[in-house]
Amino acid sequence: MPQNLSSSISSDSVIAHRPPQFSYLRKVGAIAGKDIAAELRTKEMMSAMFVFSLLVIFIFNFAFDLRTDNANTLAPGVLWVAIAFAGMLGLGRSFITERDRGSLEGLLLAPVDRSAIYFGKFLGNVLFISVVEVVILPLFIVFFNQPLDIIVPLSGVVVLGTIGFAGVGTLFSAMVIHTRARDVLLPIMLFPVVVPVLLSAVRLTAGILDKLPFEDVQNWLGLLVAFDLIFLAVSYMMFEYVVEE
Amino acid sequence: MSAGTARSAQRDTLGLVLTVISGLMMITGLYLALVFAPPAMNLQTAVERFTQRVLYFHVGAAWVGFFAFFITFAAGIGYLWRRSFFWDNLANASVEIGLTFMTMVLVTGSIWAKPTWNTWWTWSPRLTISAIGWLMYIGYLMLRSAIDNPARRARFAAVYGIVAFISVPINFMAIRWWRDIHPAVVASSSSEGTGGFDMSPNMTMTLMFCIAAFTVFYGTLLYHRMRLGKTQHEVETLKQEVLYR
């Protein structure tokens, strides 16, 4: 198998001539850093994600004609639809650009563990979606007329939701590039699986907006964290089977 | 099922026996459900009493649906481990049958719910998980149909079948915390379910028989579908041989 070959070469002969051994975290960082550098040069994905999520918030805001009496009931759903759709755009691009530019083989030939590629890509995706969220959250507060101090607990929920979403999303993103439908297939595969993330994130967001005591929503928080951990582990195990060629 | 190329063209005795047995069992099940089982005592209207009989097939179909998805999950693990066509064939066949039965569950459930709950549909946990599961495995078939390379198709389908099935219990837990009005037929902790059944021995017997009949029916369909898949595989292999000679 090719990965056995490359790993045996790298561990026996090549690395021996190249003294600096990189730690696993640095390898993950290097892969994420490559994606960030590529994105900073074009900014095409981030701008599309940002404008798209803004559009979702705008459209929901006037389509539902939100007044103060119903804003709190609909706001969490709107926020998470915006995040999920924008995230889907970013996740879809994650591996497609690698394939279109022919850099996928290079990435897979890199003398790193395949899981480092997964975590690097995952980290990049979480960062991209988070940057969009950093801009979206204040705007969400403005359009839905919420107090500013909710931004701290809300950020925590948003980060946890994004991790769960991007964890499975990165795995599926590596799969859909080999299909005929490509990124059209991603939402169809991803949304049913991440329903628990969306449910618990919406419930937690609603809890924050309604200022519920922590005890009322803590099992949702537990569920969200459990989902994140379970699916990061599952995706980590499955990624190797997805990229083997 | 280990029949060689020569034998699969011969008469299929096992398939015939299975078909006859499941046919007889389904007819008996139909008789038990519609005639033998006593009408429900506590239901007010004739319509409610009659639609209650859909339960026997509804529960059988639901059991087979989720069992079929479990088989796909197990076959996915089997494929990633052994890499043989048998496991991929099993996974694919099981999803197709599971989806058929899930569709039946959703339809019979709606027929029962209209007179009993006075609505076709409600977002109760069991209904929601059935709908999400249904969508998930539609996604599975779409993923399969979008990949041309057979080895990659089998690998990706195995990965998706595993990830999707792991999300089912988490999904169910998440949805259950919303609210549950579904009657608990098979022992469960849902005390708030309305329209629950306290079943007489004859009713229990009918239900058990129908579950058994559906399981045998599932096995029969699986056998025929896998045989078909195997033949299809053989034809494709022969085509390749002729083309690349």
Image: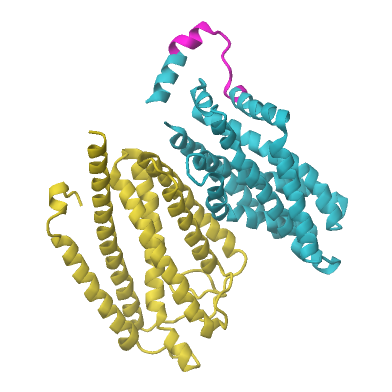
Chain colours: A cyan, B yellow
Q: Quadrant of residue A29?
A: top right
Which residue is located at x 47 percent, y 37 percent?
A237
Q: Is residue A229 something that shows in the picture? A: no
Which residue is located at x 76 percent, y 60 percent?
A60
Q: Main secondary structure of the magenta part?
A: helix
Residue lying at the far top in this picture: please name it: A17
In the picture shown, does residue A27 fall above or below A201? above
Of B189 and B224, nearer the camera is B224
Of A143 and B235, nearer the camera is B235
In the picture shown, does residue B111 fall above or below A181? below
Q: Indicate yes or no whether the magenta region holds residue A114.
A: no
- Left or right of residue A94: residue A44: right
In the picture shown, does residue B56 fall above or below A134? below
Q: Which residues are magenta?
A: A12-26
Which residue is located at x 49 percent, y 65 percent?
B130
Q: Quadrant of residue B51?
A: bottom left
Q: How many marks?
A: 0
* Image quadrant where one finds the C terminus of chain B: top left
> Where's residue B81, x and y in %?
34, 39
- Left or right of residue A11: residue A28: right
In the picture shown, does residue B17 fall above or below A170? below
- Left or right of residue A45: residue B122: left
- Left or right of residue A245: residue A198: right
> Where's residue A119, x and y in %?
58, 33
> Where's residue B188, x and y in %?
48, 69
Q: Is residue B204 something that shows in the picture? A: yes
Of B169 and A110, nearer the camera is A110
> Where's residue A215, x and y in %?
71, 57
